[in-house]
Amino acid sequence: MPNRETNSMYIVKFIAFALCVCLAIVSPTVFAATGGELDITLSIASIACIVIFILAYVLVILEEQIHLAKSKPVLVAAGIIWILIAWQYASMGLSDQSTDAFRHALLEFAELMLFLLVAMTYINALEERRLFDGLREWMVQKGFSYKQLFWLSGILAFFISPIADNLTTALLLCAVVMKVADGDRKFIAMSCVNIVVAANAGGAFSPFGDITTLMVWQANVVEFTEFFALFFPSLASYLVPAVIMSLFIEDKKPSNEGQDVELKRGALRILSLFLLTIATAVTLKTAFGLPPVLGMMLGLGYLQFFGYFLRQTLPGSLARKKALAERAGDLDKLDRLGSVVPFDVFSRVSRAEWDTLLFFYGVVMCVGGLGFIGYLSIMSDLLYNDWNATGANITLGVVSAVIDNIPVMFAVLTMMPEMSHGQWLLITLTAGIGGSLLSIGSAAGVALMGQARGYYTFMSHLKWTPVIALGYAVGVILHLYLNDSLFH
C-alpha cells in the first residue's frame, strides 16, 4: 500500500494541475480567438477533451502507484482528443483544417523525437562501453570525503548535464553516490537533492540539457549561443542551496574500496563522435538554418560506420589484446576488458527510453489539440495580457515543479506570446530550475526516487525546498539584472 507521503504527493500535484486548467476555462477571455477557424471552446466535445486530458494526466501522476507506464494514458488521450476535434470540423465541412493542424503538431514532435533518439543512442553506447563505470570507479578509488564527494557530484552534474541531459546525468551520479556512501541514508538523500538541483540547473543553459531547452531552440525563439546568457543565473541557482546544504554534511570518509574497470574498445572514440555530432547539429543550424535533427541523424550515421569498423576489426584487436595479456602475465585482464563483445548500434537504439519518447508524443499531441481548439489562447491572454510576462514566466516556473516542465513549455511555445529575448530566456530558466523545487518536478527527481528508493523521497527533498527556492529566486534576479538589455 502507498504511504501517506506518496498520497500527499499525488494529491498536491493533481490539485495544482486541475486549478491551472480551471483558471483557463473560467477566464473572462473565454470567447478569445481559437487556434482554428471555428470557435468551439464551449462545445461539449471540446470540454470533454479537457476532461480526457486531466484524467490521462491523473494516471500519469499515479504511475508508480498503479504500475501503468506513463505513455499509455496520454497516447489514448491524444487519439481521442484529435478524433473529437476532427469530428467537429468535419461536421462543418472543414476537415482539411484539422488534418493540417494534426500534421503540423506531428512534424514538431517528429523532429524532437529523432533528435532525442540519437542522443539516447549515444548515451546508451557510452554506457555499454563502460565509460560511466570507469568514472564511477575513479571517484571511488580516490577516497574522497563526504563533503568532497558532495561537491564533486554536484559540480559534475552541473557540467555534464548540458551535454548528456539532466536525467542521464542524475542517474549516473546517483549510482556513484550510492556505491560510495554504502547505506548512509542521510548523506545519500542530501546528495540526491544536490544532484537533482545541479543537473536541472546545468541543463537550463544548454539546448541539449533538457527537453524544454531543446524545444525552445528548435522553435527558433532562442539561438544556440544565446542560451549561455543563462550560465551565471543557472550556476547561482545551484550554488546557493549547495553551499547551505554542505554545512550539514559530516566531514568523514566512506570505507568503500573500488575495483579496476577497463573501458571497452572504442569508448573514447564514441565520446568524440558524440561531441562531433553535437557540433554538426549546431553548425548546420547556425550556418544554414537547417533543423538540428538533420545534424543529429548525420551523427547517427557516424556511429553506425564506427560500429561497422569495430566489428570488422574485432578479431585483430582481440588477438593483440591476448598477446599483450600473456606478455604481461595478466591472464585475467581479458575478463575485465569485455572488449570481445562486438558493438551493435541497433541494440543501443532499442535501449532508448521508448516510454519517455511515447509519453512526449502524447503530451505534445494533447497540448497541440487543446491549443488548436483555443484553450491555449485563453491561457495566453490570462497570463501574458491580464498579468505581465515576467510574473507569468516566474509563476509558470513554480507550476512546472508540480505539473511537469514539458507540457508547460510546450503550452507556452504553442501560445507563442509576444515576448522579448530576455523573457524567452526567463521562461527557459524558470522551467528548468523550477522543477527542482519538488522531487516530482523533473524527470531527474522522479528517476532518482526510483533508483534511490528508501533513501531519496518526496519528504527528504521537501525538507530542502526553502533553500532551493532561495536559489530559484537568486537565479531569476541575477538573470533580470545581468541580461537587462535583452528585455528591451
Image (tube, helix red, strand yellow):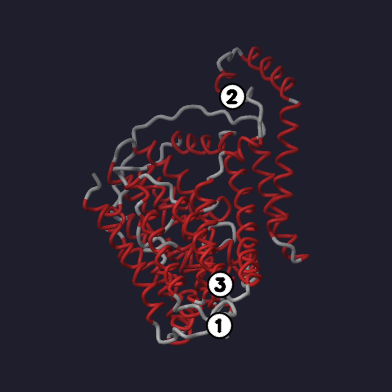
Which residue is label 1 attached to? Answer: 487
Separation of disc 2 and disc 3 at Cα?
A: 48 Å
Q: Nearer the viewer, residue 378 or 244?
A: 378
Name the residue beneath numbered marker 2: 338
User: Relative to the observer, which residue lies in front, 278 or 347?
Assistant: 347
Which quadrant would residue 92 be assigned to in this image? bottom right
Q: Name the residue nearer the viewer: 82 or 345.
A: 82
Q: In which quarter of the image is the N terminus?
A: top left
Q: What residue is shown at x 70% (from left), y 60% (from top)?
A: 282
Q: Residue 414 carries which label?
A: 3
Residue 8 image offset from top left, x and y in percent: 25, 58
Answer yes or no: do the residues labelled 2 and 1 have beta carbons within 8 Å? no
Task: Residue type at mark 1: give it.
Answer: Phe
The answer to whether residue 8 is left or right of residue 257 is left
Whichever of callouts 2 and 1 sits on the residue coming sooner in the sequence is 2
**Helix, strand or loop at mark 3:** helix
Residue 163 image position (x, y, % from top left): 58, 53
Give how far apart the Cα atoms at labels 2 and 1 are: 54 Å
Callout 2 secondary element: loop
- Residue found at x 45% / y 49%: 170
Disc 3 marks which amino acid?
Answer: Thr
Q: Residue 188 carries which label?
A: none
Disc tally is: 3
Q: In which quarter of the image is the C terminus?
A: bottom right
Secondary structure of the residue carrying tag 1 is helix
Q: Earlier in the sequence, mark 2 or mark 3?
A: 2
Q: Position of residue 424 (x, y in %)?
A: 55, 74
Contact? badges 3 and 1 (CB < 8 Å): no
How many residues crowd around disc 3 within 10 Å: few (fewer than 14), some, or many (20 or more)?
many
**Which mark is nearer the camera, 2 or 3?**
3
Asked if the residues shown at circle 2 and circle 3 are in contact, with their CB atoms under 8 angstroms apart, the answer is: no
Query: Alpha-carbon distance for marks 3 and 1?
Result: 21 Å
